[in-house]
Image (tube, rainbow, N blue to C red):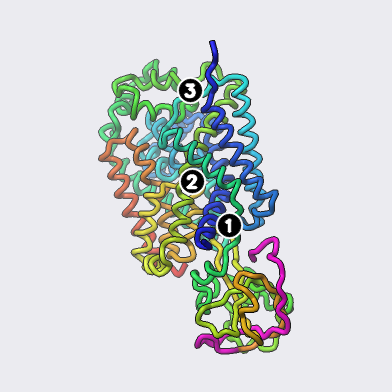
Amino acid sequence: MKRTFPWPIALDALALLLWGLMILRYWWTGRLAVLLHPDYHWLAIGAGWLLLLMAVWRGAALLWSPKSLNTPHIALLPRRWSLAVLLAVAAFGIIYIPRPFTSDTALARGIADPVALTRSQPQRFARNTPPEERSLIDWIRLLNVYPEPDAYTDEPVNITGFVIHPPNWPEDYLMAARFVLTCCAADAYPVGLPVQLLGDRTEFAPDSWVNITGTMMTATVDGQRRLVIEPEEVLPVPEPKNPYEF
Amino acid sequence: MSQFNQGLTLFLSLLVEATPFLLLGVAFSSLLAILVDERKLVALTPKNPVLAAISGSLFGCLFPVCECGNVPVARRLLMQGAPSALAIGFLLAAPTVNPIVFWATWVAFRDQPSMVFWRVGLTILISVIIACVFSVQKDLRPFLQPAIARQLLPPEPEPALATASDSPLLTRGTYLLQSTGTVKLDQPLASTLDTAVLPTATWTIKAQAVLEMMLQEFRELGAVLVMGSAIAATVQVAIPREWILALGQGPITSILAMMLLAWVVSICSTVDSFFALSFASIFTSGSILAFLVFGPMIDLKNISLLLTTFKSRAVIYLFVLAAQLTFVFTLAVNLYTSW
């Protein structure tokens, strides 16, 4: 008698395999940094390997004992539905390349508004760091603690961020911004500092990455007195391996 | 287009961050279902309703199950003669008060570690209150489905029940499908359970059973996680920020909105903190807390599970009490704490 092919087991194994591969592929291609805080990469990678092992175990059942499948179980969703959802997402996740958030997202989240500086409480006080070594988020945390822009006048700056063109700002202003992550992309929030250019901002396209060196000054942007970078040099740079700050 | 990409990045990041915790949750619940004998636990627990309620709500540390796994365990506790306060306390608190959920919440809210303590403290408080309310009803049988109530009736244990509980934990979850679908309610429960009891329990068979359970739970909860993540990503990307801001900043509206969301989304408690995280910057802390406390107690998904054990009247009591208490306490958090 010809044995029918045990599709349910094969599909289980395939779903586990694809999920594992999806996670591991993000790791191999370096895209995990777009999704997660580096502290938690090991968790995701471990889960990826575990899923692969489970796929192997499930796949082995194809060869040996496909009978064991008939255990009854709580059925919230019909088994086929759950399988279809898992398979579809994994297949998509393996093809799709996740991209970091863009300037549109930052604008939609109200980055141009100086009130919305940051929601995180400062973890460390960066005042001790020499100004030219402060990252963008260090500057923002400092401003959170002591918001008076004049306090920082003439301090040297050296930061890297992506370009935003806030619509209400004059043409010679752009914002250098970054997203800050505490856990994963779901909690990313944008921070940024205004940069007063000598020329027109169209030279630097939105979402392109720049390294800015210069000094701090105070200026009025869009009716608000703010800390502004007066650049000596604005250099286009490639997107950093990890686009977020922490 | 950029919104679409943003949504997908959000969606995938929630999935990738939550998958390890989901796997950990299903692994632990499957392992412990096989290793822990709850009859011994029941024998050890105090009979005083308040103490029983407290120990019930702390049982979750021994059974790190999410809200899908706790209904079968609570039912077994009841059937093995646990006081109602113990079973109800366990039912409400276990999905939250367990090490895996601590850790996941800690990871998600690293910026606000107090969220972990509020979540656990409030869950225990609400569970103990509701368990004490239920303990006033000395005989829970009128609240239970007839098939379960009948099992509680006999003063001495039936021989058939004893066979089933030789290995009671291996039967985890097997009864539900049948009770809702295929099995007549007048059929003795033990015979139903017997069908799924593994004949001999060598460690290879146990390991096989653990893996089988893990896979089944991962398949189901994974699908729910996918849908939950999709909803979270869509809400963030598609709904205008002004609306969400208006809703999320009001001390009352934000709590109601997050409770409704918790009820509808039905996301597993091991991963719901990541879901909540995506709302944390806009919604009041009290409302995030309401989501994290109320969701694991009662949601759309586990109402159908609860109904396999409890009559609808009891489920409504549970629901109303849990909702009211969560609302009142988290509103107090919003209004009277600066957190």
Q: Secondary structure at mark 3?
A: loop
x%, y% of residue B64? 51, 40
Q: Quadrant of the N terminus of chain A?
A: top right
Looking at the image, which is closer to me, A235 or A30?
A235
* Placement of A9 over or under B241, stated as above or below: above
Q: In the image, is residue A129 above or below residue B264?
A: below
Disc 3 residue crowd, few under 14, some 14–19, many 20+, Cα 10 Å:
few
Say which amino acid is labelled 2: Leu
Label placed on residue A70: 3
**For the point 37% across and 60% down, which residue is it?**
B255
Q: Gap in Å between the C-alphas at discs 2 and 1?
A: 16 Å
Q: Chain of mark 1?
A: A
As drawn, the label of residue B225 is: 2
Majority secondary structure in the magenta region:
strand
- Between disc 1 and disc 3, whose residue precedes? 3
User: What residue does disc 1 label?
Assistant: A184
Q: Is residue B193 left or right of residue A164?
A: left
